[in-house]
């Protein structure tokens, strides 16, 4: 009864077609009768998520009744409700409930649009800043633009909807994408592990689903230890680790990732602990002992705010405690680079 009209096969979104009139009944009461009516007649009060059951009509209130109650057949009401309206001379009258596009959720709209044989509703997405990132299977591609528009309409925080294409940059791991709805604005701000990251989602690798794994690994790092992040990206390991006062040598070959990494180090105020590099992974591994040595024997860290600021001297360890290589497809190929890096 409350589902949207069936518009299977629609490819161009026409919101005006999503309209439905539902015939209900309503009890006309005064304002001071509402609490007593709700207690005495609760079995017959209208209860549907996201729809109000009490409406103002002039000086009176209309309390909507459950579907199946007929205004000209009081036998459709429960016995307590019939007794109550009889005792208080309450009028039961027809009421037309109007539903439109704004009422239904993403999955409701998509289930009414997509062909019946497509029984899975592709309403899920990964949110990266203001971008909803989809990975649509082939059978949904003829409907990709209307899917994107519905997701854009129904999710306040989403400003742009993109679909991942099969083309992946093998060097930098970022994927090609197609804008399905909204402006082609890819500069995002993403919060993760108490840090804020800025980056161009079309030029770097980012996976919001890895937040828990990022946090798990960061907890393994020693405070005031040295970690080398060989494929650091925009800093999802390095920046939060720096906030935990772990020294991090963070590297990424992708120039766009490196620039965002440097920006994120500065924005999150972890420059005393995190250094950014734009090197080939193998070169970075080979040079890492020297880079760690270049950190110096001590680091000066400013703590506190305004007039309470003070410098704190932290000893920098001599040796690197961890290497992180978040590059599942080819990290193993870099293991040989460690042979000449032992110190």
Image: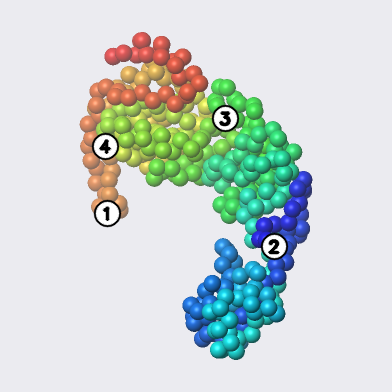
Pointers 4 and 1 in contact (C-beta within 8 Å): no
Q: Earlier in the sequence, mark 4 or mark 2?
A: 2
Q: Nearer the viewer, residue 279 or 174?
A: 174
Residue underneath mark 4: 300
Q: Which residue is mark 3?
A: 174
| Mark in front: 3 vs 1 | 3
199 relative to 173, above or below: below
Residue placed at 54% from the left, 84% from the top?
A: 84
Foreground label between 3 and 4? 3
| CB atoms of marks 1 and 2 within 8 Å | no
Q: Secondary structure at mark 3?
A: loop
Q: Secondary structure at mark 1?
A: helix
Q: CA distance from mark 4 to mark 1?
A: 18 Å
Tag 2 secondary structure: strand
Residue 203: percent from the left, percent from the top?
Answer: 57, 33
Numbered-mark total: 4
**Which residue is pictured at 33% across the width and 27% down the height?**
227
Q: Quadrant of the C terminus?
A: top left
Tell which circle, 3 or 4, labels the residue nearer the N-terminal end. 3
Quarter of the image holding residue 166?
top right
Q: Position of residue 79 (x, y in %)?
A: 56, 78
| Number of other residues with Cα within 10 Å of mark 1, as a class: few under 14, some 14 to 19, many 20 or more | few
Q: CA distance from mark 3 to mark 4?
A: 36 Å
For residue 153, say whether it is visible.
Answer: yes
Residue 188: image x %, image y %?
A: 54, 43
């Amino acid at each position: 009864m409350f589902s949207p009209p069936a518009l299977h096969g629609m490819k161009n979104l026409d919101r005006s077609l999503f309209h439905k009139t539902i015939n209900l009944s309503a009890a006309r009461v005064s304002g001071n009768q509402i609490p007593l009516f709700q207690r005495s007649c609760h079995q017959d009060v209208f209860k549907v998520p996201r729809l109000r059951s009490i409406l103002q009509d002039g000086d009176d209130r209309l309390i909507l009744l459950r579907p199946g109650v007929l205004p000209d057949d009081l036998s459709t009401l429960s016995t307590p409700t019939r007794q109550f309206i009889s005792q208080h001379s309450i009028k039961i009258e027809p009421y037309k409930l109007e539903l439109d596009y704004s009422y239904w959720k993403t999955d409701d709209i998509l289930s009414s649009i997509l062909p019946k044989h497509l029984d899975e509703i592709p309403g899920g997405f990964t949110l990266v800043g203001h971008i909803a990132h989809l990975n649509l299977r082939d059978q949904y591609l003829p409907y990709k633009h209307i899917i994107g528009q519905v997701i854009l309409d129904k999710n306040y925080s989403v400003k742009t909807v993109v679909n991942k294409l099969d083309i992946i940059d093998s060097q930098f791991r970022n994927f090609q994408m197609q804008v399905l709805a909204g402006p082609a604005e890819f500069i995002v701000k993403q919060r993760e592990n108490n840090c804020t990251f800025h980056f161009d989602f079309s030029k770097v690798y980012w996976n919001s689903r890895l937040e828990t794994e990022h946090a798990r690994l960061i907890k393994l790092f020693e405070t005031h230890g040295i970690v080398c992040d060989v494929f650091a990206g925009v800093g999802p390991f390095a920046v939060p680790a720096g906030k935990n006062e772990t020294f991090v040598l963070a590297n990424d070959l992708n120039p766009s990732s490196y620039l965002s990494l440097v920006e994120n180090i500065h924005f999150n105020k972890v420059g005393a602990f995190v250094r950014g590099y734009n090197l080939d992974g193998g070169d970075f591994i080979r040079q890492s002992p020297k880079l760690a040595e270049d950190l110096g024997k001590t680091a000066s860290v400013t703590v506190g705010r305004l007039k309470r600021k003070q410098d704190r001297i932290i000893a920098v360890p001599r040796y690197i405690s961890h290497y992180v290589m978040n590059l599942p497809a080819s990290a193993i190929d870099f293991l040989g680079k460690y042979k000449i890096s032992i110190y």
